[in-house]
């Protein structure tokens, strides 16, 4: 027997799919108008509320569109976030997993604050979260309309309270790029890199002949000639298989990787000095100079038959493709461990770091063989044995 209700639901939901595929005809213009009424770039379609009473603002658009959106959201497979990463990727607004009790409506409703959406606070990852708490200061400074700031901020915090254990620590990408200085795309002086999605700046950076990067820092740090920027881009971004590691490299070359020295400016509980060495906790210290990583680089150097230097790590020019990927992966994991230490307030342990690196390399080795990158795969596997012993 045909389930008539499901049939009509599916029919309504399919209108949204038609809309997403449609060109700008008259029909889709109306739909576009109503959908973007709730936030640009089809934000409404990224929400997951599936009842009108949990998203009362939907009542502002015609019934036909309301039903379509509800049917579309019902057809989605949404799950409750189970870890930090999933929570960070969640849209804050119209999210049935992030609800509060509404006195006015006498039931649980999802959140929807236009003034936050207007300034780009869309996902949980857009919030500055320190030690499981959303930063008041950051949101206050961002909002253009601050009238309801206090009560809105309070409600967002209450709605997310059940995820306290997953909130941890999050610095929005935007902030990492803004401090201490922000790279600007050459020829596009008005386009700040932080406002572009990652994909955009890789392609832009790689195709430009000259790139205005902040390499001045390295001139004093390394006391060696700085290689050609195009060459650095080729090694540290194009040659790197995994995009998030290429992104990390990009930040490292620009000296804007999150570190204690940088983050302590916002939050005094983060130490600007390394707990182990009492040196400034800079990106170079974390990745290369700290006593906790010396042994790891020593083992790599011994086995590749060449002493790995900060210069090799930063620019990659002197390394072959496999070693370059390996070194970048290790830097990335070392930094990941540093973030974890800050997040969970754990004491640095060389043994633990070594285990994490070995695990990451083994796992990535299987990913690389799946991608038919057999040389990199075997490099990772071999290196995991060097480091593990
Ligand atoms: Zn240290």
Image (cartoon, rainbow, N blue to C red):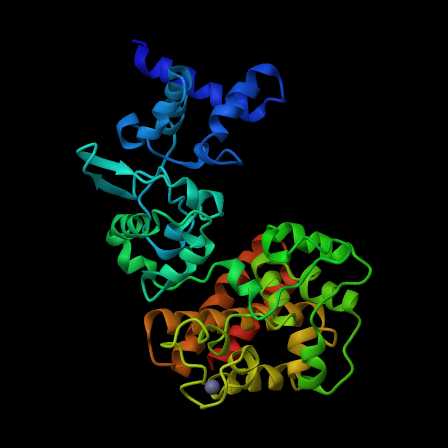
User: Is residue 285 rendered to the left or right of residue 301?
Assistant: left
The residue that appears at 46% across and 75% down in the rendered structure is: 265
The residue that appears at 48% across and 66% down in the rendered structure is: 360
User: How many discs appear?
Assistant: 0
Q: Is residue 3 visible?
A: no
Which residue ends up furthest to the right in the rendered image? Answer: 209
**Against 347, is 245 above or below?**
above
- Would you identify the image quadrant in which residue 61 lies? top left
User: Is residue 66 rendered to the left or right of residue 160?
Assistant: right
Q: Position of residue 1 (x, y in %)?
A: 29, 9
Which residue ends up furthest to the front in the rendered image? Answer: 147
Q: Nearer the viewer, residue 289 or 384?
A: 289
Q: Position of residue 83 (x, y in %)?
A: 34, 55
Q: Is residue 151 visible?
A: yes
- Would you identify the image quadrant in which residue 48 lies? top left
Q: Nearer the viewer, residue 151 or 239?
A: 151
Q: Nearer the viewer, residue 202 or 176?
A: 176
Q: Nearer the viewer, residue 231 or 88?
A: 88
**Against 148, is 340 above or below?**
below
- Would you identify the image quadrant in which residue 164 lies? bottom left
Q: Position of residue 106 (x, y in %)?
A: 17, 33
Q: Position of residue 230 (x, y in %)?
A: 78, 65
């Amino acid at each position: 027997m045909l389930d008539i209700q499901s049939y009509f639901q599916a029919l309504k939901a399919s209108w949204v799919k038609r809309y997403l595929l449609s060109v700008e005809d008259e029909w889709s213009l109306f739909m576009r108008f109503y959908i973007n009424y709730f936030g640009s770039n089809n934000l409404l379609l990224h929400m997951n509320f599936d009842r009108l009473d949990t998203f009362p603002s939907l009542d502002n658009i015609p019934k036909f569109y309301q039903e379509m959106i509800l049917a579309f959201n019902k057809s989605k497979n949404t799950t409750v976030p189970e870890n930090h990463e999933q929570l960070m990727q969640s849209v804050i607004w119209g999210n049935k997993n992030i609800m509060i009790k509404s006195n006015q409506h006498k039931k649980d409703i999802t959140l929807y604050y236009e003034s936050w959406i207007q300034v780009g606070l869309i996902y949980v990852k857009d919030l500055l979260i320190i030690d499981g708490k959303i930063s008041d200061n950051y949101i206050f400074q961002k909002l253009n309309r601050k009238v309801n700031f206090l009560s809105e901020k309070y409600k967002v915090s209450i709605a997310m309270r059940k995820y306290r254990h997953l909130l941890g620590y999050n610095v929005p990408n935007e902030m990492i790029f803004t401090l201490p200085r922000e790279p600007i795309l050459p020829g596009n002086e008005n386009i700040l890199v932080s406002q572009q999605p990652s994909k955009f700046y890789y392609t832009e950076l790689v195709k430009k002949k000259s790139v205005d990067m902040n390499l001045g820092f390295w001139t004093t740090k390394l006391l060696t000639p700085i290689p050609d920027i195009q060459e650095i881009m080729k090694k540290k971004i194009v040659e790197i298989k995994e995009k998030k590691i290429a992104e990390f490299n990009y930040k490292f070359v620009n000296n804007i990787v999150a570190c204690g020295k940088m983050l302590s400016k916002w939050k005094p509980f983060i130490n600007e000095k390394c707990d182990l060495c009492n040196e400034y906790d800079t990106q170079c210290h974390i990745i290369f100079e700290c006593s906790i990583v010396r042994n790891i680089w020593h083992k790599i150097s011994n086995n590749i038959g060449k002493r790995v230097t900060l210069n090799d790590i930063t620019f990659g020019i002197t390394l072959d493709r496999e070693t370059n990927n390996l070194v970048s992966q290790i830097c990335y994991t070392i930094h990941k461990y540093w973030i974890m230490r800050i997040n969970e307030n754990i004491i640095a342990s060389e043994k633990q770091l070594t285990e994490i690196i070995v695990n990451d390399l083994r796992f990535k080795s299987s990913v690389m063989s799946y991608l038919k990158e057999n040389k990199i795969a075997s490099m990772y596997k071999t290196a995991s044995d060097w480091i593990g012993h």
